[in-house]
Structures are given as C-alpha cells and as structure tokens.
Image (cartoon, helix red, strand yellow):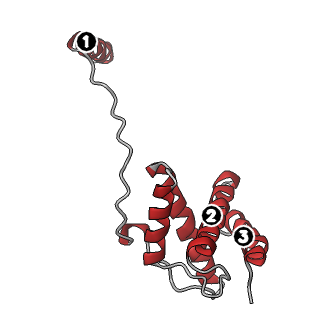
Amino acid sequence: MINIATIQRTLIKNFYRHQIGVVRSKKTTAKNYAYDAKQYISFFSLEIDETLTHFEITKSMIHKFVAYRRELGRAESTIERQVHGLIAFWDFLHLQGLATEPIPYKKLGLNIKPIVNPTQPLSKNDNNRFMKGIFDELETIW
C-alpha cells in the first residue's frame, strides 16, 4: 500500500525532476508545481481518503480542491496557478501509467475569477501631451 510519505518523497521528487528535465520548466516553476502537488495530496489525505488507497486526480476532485483552497482564503490567482501545477502533476502521473489522461485547464469548467486591476485612464491634458509627443516624433521621421 502506498502511503503519503512515499508519494511525497518519491513521486514529488520525480515530478520535480520531470518538470525540469523533460518539460524544461524553470526551477521556480518546477518547485511551485511540486508544492501544488503536495498540497493536493495533503488535501486528498485530509478530506477524501486518509490512507490514499484510492488516490486520484479527476475533474470533480479538482473542483473540490478549488473549493477547499477558497475556504482557506487563497487568492484566485494562487488557486489558478495551483490548478495548472496540479494538471502538470496529473499529466506526469498519466505518463507513469498511474492516472487517466488529464483534462486541459479550459475544459475543467472552473469559474476562477481573473484579477482585474485596470490602469487608470490618462487625463485629457496628459492624453493631449502624449499624443502631441507622438505626432512631433512622427514629423521628424517624415
């Protein structure tokens, strides 16, 4: 029987190496994705199956994971990155013959709110100065 310590030591380490060596991810991305996989394994162990006998990653489990992360107060941008890391872990497990084929992010049907942080529009005076600078520059070219 596979226990949580074995999964975290072996699979996560191999997943990290796979991300760097095969996928060619940057070390920070690989480290973040490995952390995301650990977070999912912990969630699964706490909320679904303590023994991890029935460990799986599925569309419905990702939805439960997202709900769980929201309950913990995680930012939407963090949750979105964690889902991408989890899909990468799912793909890795699939390549190892340990999971079904992963579902692309867009087909998961998640309602993760994008961060909207628009820039403020220029004032009319600033816009006029900006446009005048562009026109003046263009006149020197022509």
Mark 1 vs 2, N-terminal side? 2
Q: Answer with left or right where residue 116 lies relative to residue 24.
A: left
Please report contact status of discs 1 and 3: CB closer than 8 Å, yes or no.
no
Mark 1 vs 3, N-terminal side? 3
Q: Please tell me whether mark 1 sits on a helix, a strand or a loop.
A: helix
Question: In front here: 100 or 52?
Answer: 52
Q: How crowded is mark 1: few (under 14 residues within 10 Å), some or many (20 or more)?
A: few
Residue at coordinates 49% horizontally, 78% vertically from top-left? 102
Q: What residue type is labelled 3?
A: Ile
- Locate residue 46: give its quadrant: bottom right
- Locate residue 133: give its quadrant: top left
Q: Which amino acid does label 2 sit on?
A: Gln
Q: Name the residue under label 3.
A: 12
Q: How many marks on residues?
A: 3
Q: Where is residue 134 in the image (x, y as percent from the top left)?
A: 29, 17
Q: Mark 1 points at which residue?
A: 132
